[in-house]
Image: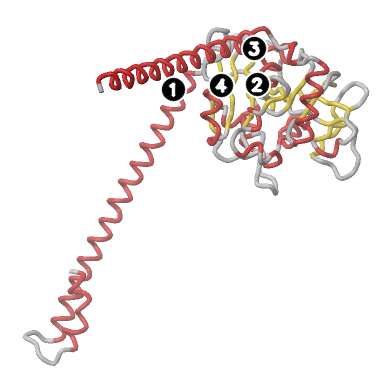
Amino acid sequence: MIFMMMVTPFFVNSPVGIFSKEIIQALFVSMEFVVSVFFLNEYHRLKIIIQKDEASKKSVKHIETGLKKLFFKKSDTGMKGIVLSGGTATRLFPLTATTSKQLLPVYNKQMIFYPLNTLIKAGIRDILLIVSPENSGQYLNLLGSIFKNHGVNLYFEVQKVPGGLPEAFILGENFIGSDNVTLVLGDNIIEDDIKAISKFKSGGHIFAKKVHDPERSGVVKFDKNKKVVKIVEKPKKWISDYAIPGLYIFDNNVVEIAKKLKPSKRGELEIVDLQLAYLKKDQLRVDILKGAWMDAGTHESLLEAGKIVKEKKIAENFHPIINAAIDEFNNELKMRTKAVLNMHNLHLREEFMLNKKNKNKK
């Protein structure tokens, strides 16, 4: 039919023909109409199929969400924890070219164990670890089953592209469920035991640490009663000497609040906007950290963190659960390594005996 439509002008303008030009024109106009109706019907048919397919996908997604919510049970303490360990850590290249920043050693333990210790010491036993796709396998090898005998439920979520700290609450929506949540950044090492986590009821709760270079991070200003007055992300003008460490406690409303945030000029959701949302409702509290706080995100700070951890014996004061889990992991790894070596040595002996036997035959 399409071919006939294309040759219509040749038939109409041809001097020889059985039918008159008027009849030929009418014939081809009719055929064009039939073809147009055919394609229009096909368009509507395909549109209906696509709509049904989209509805089916939405239905499947709804079912998946429901199953995930069933999978993540409510915490016994009403508080869950998230460790954000995604990102590319370009400031630590080339160290992070082959592994995650949070898997680098800080003195005698991988960095990731320090934020995990902060949460576990506070009584949290349900923890979501958000990782980048490139390093997800390494996290599973180290942490996949390390706490299985120690009462800690560790879950994993892959963050394909970093979208800002508040995205952790959006990615962790099903995990959080109806519980409150504490977020700690995977490169933050905090010496203090955080009592505020177990005492938390509602609203938002941040922490402050006096530093000599507050302009490098979010800064909080508060009055003598520790009432938050102002929060600014990397201020150009002096606001306060108190930086905000990467440890945040929020109630269950944080998921919906995070969803309503708009990306900044960087194209990411900003944690300061989330904090300001709670501040506007007069629901944001602050505590001052007394012990050491380290953000091990550069070569210099990573080296300094190792020194401070050693001097203050921070790694020696880990929760018994973590120490026991690491010891168990190390013993299992030694046994597996020994078993592999034994198999290799056995194979070598068998090969040696076979070669010796063959030589004797000759």
Determine the secondary structure under disc 4.
helix
Q: Amino acid at mark 4?
A: Leu
Q: Are marks 3 and 1 in contact (CB under 8 Å)?
A: no
Image point (77%, 30%), residue name? 303
Instruction: Return the disc, 2 or 4, that comes first in the chain's sequence.
Output: 4
The residue at which mark 2 appears reads as 181
Determine the secondary structure under disc 1.
helix
Q: Amino acid at mark 3?
A: Ile
In this view, 137 is above or below 266 = above
Instruction: Return the disc, 2 or 1, that comes first in the chain's sequence.
Output: 1
Quote the CA–CA distance across marks 1 and 4: 27 Å
Could you tell whether 12 is left or right of 322 in the image?
Answer: left
Q: Nearer the viewer, residue 86 or 297?
A: 297
The residue at which mark 1 appears reads as 67
Percent of width and height locating residue 214 = 86, 35
Q: Are marks 4 and 3 in contact (CB under 8 Å)?
A: no
The residue at which mark 4 appears reads as 142
Instruction: Return the disc, 1 or 4, that comes first in the chain's sequence.
Output: 1
Colouring scheme, one of rainbow, by chain, secondary structure, one colour: secondary structure
Q: Nearer the viewer, residue 179 or 360?
A: 360
Instruction: Return the disc, 4 or 3, that comes first in the chain's sequence.
Output: 4
The residue at which mark 3 appears reads as 322
Determine the secondary structure under disc 3.
helix
Determine the secondary structure under disc 2.
strand
